[in-house]
Image: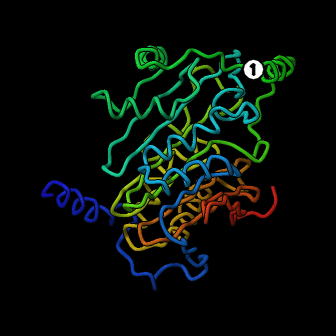
Amino acid sequence: MIRRSFLNNLILSSMGFLGLSKVKASQINPTSLPPIKLTGIPFSICTWNCPEAIITSGDLMMSGTNSLDAVIKGVAVEEANVDNTTVGIGSTPDREGHVTLDACVMNSEGNCGAVMAVENIVHVADLARKVMLETPHVILNGIGAEQFAYEKGFLKTNLLTKAAEDKWKKWLKTSNYQPKINIENHDTIGMLCIDKNGDLSGACTTSGLGYKMRGRVGDSPIIGSGLFVDNEVGAATATGMGEEVIKTVGSFLIVELMRSGMSPQAACEEAIQRVVAKHKGKPLFQVGFIAVNTAGAIGSYSIHSGFSYTYYENGKAINKPSKSIYSTI
């Protein structure tokens, strides 16, 4: 407890340098959207329209499953979905034809684990959990992460489907690399869960940019960028152009803004504004954030329209469009 108090005081005293001075709710930008109140816990929310993933996590927590197990099972639905070209099996390969996956997890105790550039393993979020719980490390990458997966009983699976391979071969004819905004109205899945005990956990899993350079890693497996969870404050996760999220350490920023008094909605808006401020003119890429706090409010914001989020309510998955800076791409 002494160490926790020291760290909290250190963070708060550092906020002046980061522009995160403690504010009251009445001081928040009045143009921010009002907080969206949750209907109660358990609760789960994720980026994009992933109804089966959300229902899986929500139903599990309703039956008593903890938030960490629920979030892993939830994102696993999309990792196994061959029609999702940005997560798990069936993902778009890099420019050399290799499908590599990234993921990270955080639990209510502040522990975290991540894997990067993993081949031949479908459920990398679960693998990241194994790193967190069963190794002294936070991150494993590449061949080392794959070897660890086999040691833990994960099956070797060819992640490159025929459909993805055909598209890659067609792409090779021009090799034109242009990341697409809201690719097929989907991207990285980041999920945040609150269980019956009020404990938070999160997971973020992706294959990254299609036709990326071999070895490229985005924000998704980087704690503080693609995902951050603090059981005393709330949690946030990101989707979109990972390089831009990394530059602002977006998810950590949102949680610290919430710690300083902002609602999740206001914090998401501020984080997006900081991304956009680094560019002249209208950015030709997408970034979106979702967040939840321990008081029962959620937030979502993106650069461009088209981003959406899905949450669990009364046994159903509710998908809503996110507010954005630009209404057209």
Q: Can you give x and y, in whole percent of width and height, for residue 102 in the image?
A: 54, 31
Q: Can you give x and y, in whole percent of width and height, for residue 181 in the image?
A: 75, 46
Between 322 and 60, the one lying in front of the other is 60
Query: Relative to residue 11, is residue 252 drawn left or right?
Result: right
* Three-letter code, disc 1: Thr
Q: Quadrant of residue 216?
A: top right
Question: Which residue extends farthest left?
Answer: 2
Q: Which residue is mark 1?
A: 161
Question: Which residue extends farthest front?
Answer: 63
Q: Can you give x and y, in whole percent of width and height, for residue 223 in the image?
A: 42, 42
**By what rule are the colours in the image chosen?**
rainbow
Q: Quadrant of residue 293?
A: bottom left
Q: Residue at x 57, y 58 (%)?
A: 290
Circle 1 residues within 10 Å: few <14, some 14–19, many ≥20: some
Q: Is residue 146 above or below residue 182?
A: above
Q: Residue at x 56, y 14 (%)?
A: 156
Query: Relative to residue 186, is residue 251 drawn left or right?
Result: left
Q: Quadrant of the N terminus?
A: bottom left
Look at the numbered disc 1 and give the secondary structure of its residue. loop
Q: Is residue 143 above or below residue 107?
A: above
Q: Quadrant of the C terminus?
A: bottom right
Q: Can you give x and y, in whole percent of width and height, for residue 116 in the image?
A: 50, 27
Q: Quadrant of residue 188?
A: top right
Between 223 and 157, the one lying in front of the other is 157
Query: Relative to residue 190, is residue 140 drawn left or right?
Result: left
Q: How many marks overall?
A: 1
Q: Residue at x 38, y 47 (%)?
A: 107
Q: Residue at x 55, y 75 (%)?
A: 35
